[in-house]
């Protein structure tokens, strides 16, 4: 199986376990939407994209996901993947990860901490927007780009120690992060939006 279609298991409140197959390359919109008994998932390294355009809803929105593990050798967290997973508290990202695409964690309102592995070079637009409980971000040491609104409205974030490898912080990246008390701007920064 390389594709799980749009709304494939939507509203299945009894679904408590889902083993995504190795070789899965695409998840359709709302594939597991409102699967409230589904509390953990392993995302295969083969996953390349989330739905077709226009994407309006992530595959796990409204689910009961609390823990997500990305397989070793994963390189991207695809757009919209965990958007609106409001119960999510644990995310395990392997060191092989290089990119977190736009809106990947938007509205994950229970997520308090995140470790960005050293090989991640890009945090995409709105990747963590409206993660209102996010208080601590451990930025990887090879990070180069923080996208537009990446941490917008992260109202619990108190400190952002951005590594010196970052050259671009896009528009409104930390807009609305009202608790932010300490922000380390990197020495190699060439653009601050």
Image: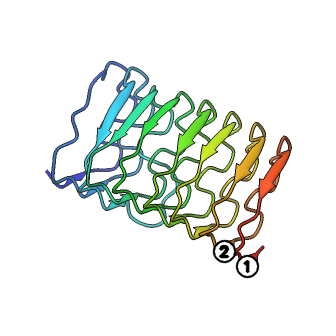
Tell me if residue 167 comes above or below residue 132 in the rendering.
below
Tell me if residue 102 comes above or below residue 189 in the rendering.
above
- Of labels 1 and 2, earlier in sequence is 2
Helix, strand or loop for disc 2: strand
Residue 168 badge: 2
- In what quadrant of the picture does the C terminus appear? bottom right
| Residue 119: percent from left, percent from top | 43, 61
Other residues around mark 1 within 10 Å, as few (<14) / some (14–19) / many (≥20):
few
Choose top left, top right, bottom left or bottom right for residue 192. bottom right
Q: Mark 1 highlights which residue?
A: 191
Between 11 and 133, which is closer to the camera in this rendering? 133
Q: Is residue 110 left or right of residue 55?
A: right
Between 139 and 179, which is closer to the camera in this rendering? 139
Other residues around mark 2 within 10 Å, as few (<14) / some (14–19) / many (≥20):
some
Residue at 27 percent across and 25 percent down: it is: 17
| Residue 95: percent from left, percent from top | 37, 52
State the colouring used for the structure image. Answer: rainbow
């Amino acid at each position: 199986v390389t594709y799980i279609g749009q709304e494939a298991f939507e509203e299945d409140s009894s679904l408590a376990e889902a083993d995504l197959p190795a070789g899965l390359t695409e998840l359709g919109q709302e594939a597991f939407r409102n699967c409230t008994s589904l509390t953990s998932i392993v995302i295969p390294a083969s996953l390349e994209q989330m739905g077709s355009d226009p994407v309006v809803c992530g595959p796990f929105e409204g689910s009961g996901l609390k823990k997500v593990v990305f397989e070793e050798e994963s390189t991207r967290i695809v757009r919209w993947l965990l958007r609106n997973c409001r119960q999510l508290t644990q995310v395990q990202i392997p060191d092989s990860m290089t990119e977190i695409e736009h809106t990947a964690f938007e509205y994950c309102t229970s997520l308090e901490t995140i470790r960005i592995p050293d090989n991640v070079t890009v945090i995409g637009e709105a990747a963590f927007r409206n993660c209102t409980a996010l208080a601590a971000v451990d930025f990887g040491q090879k990070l180069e780009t923080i996208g537009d609104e990446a941490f917008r409205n992260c109202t619990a974030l108190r400190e952002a120690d951005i590594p010196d490898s970052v050259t671009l912080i896009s528009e409104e990246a930390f807009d609305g992060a009202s608790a932010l008390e300490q922000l380390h701007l990197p020495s190699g920064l060439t653009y601050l939006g």
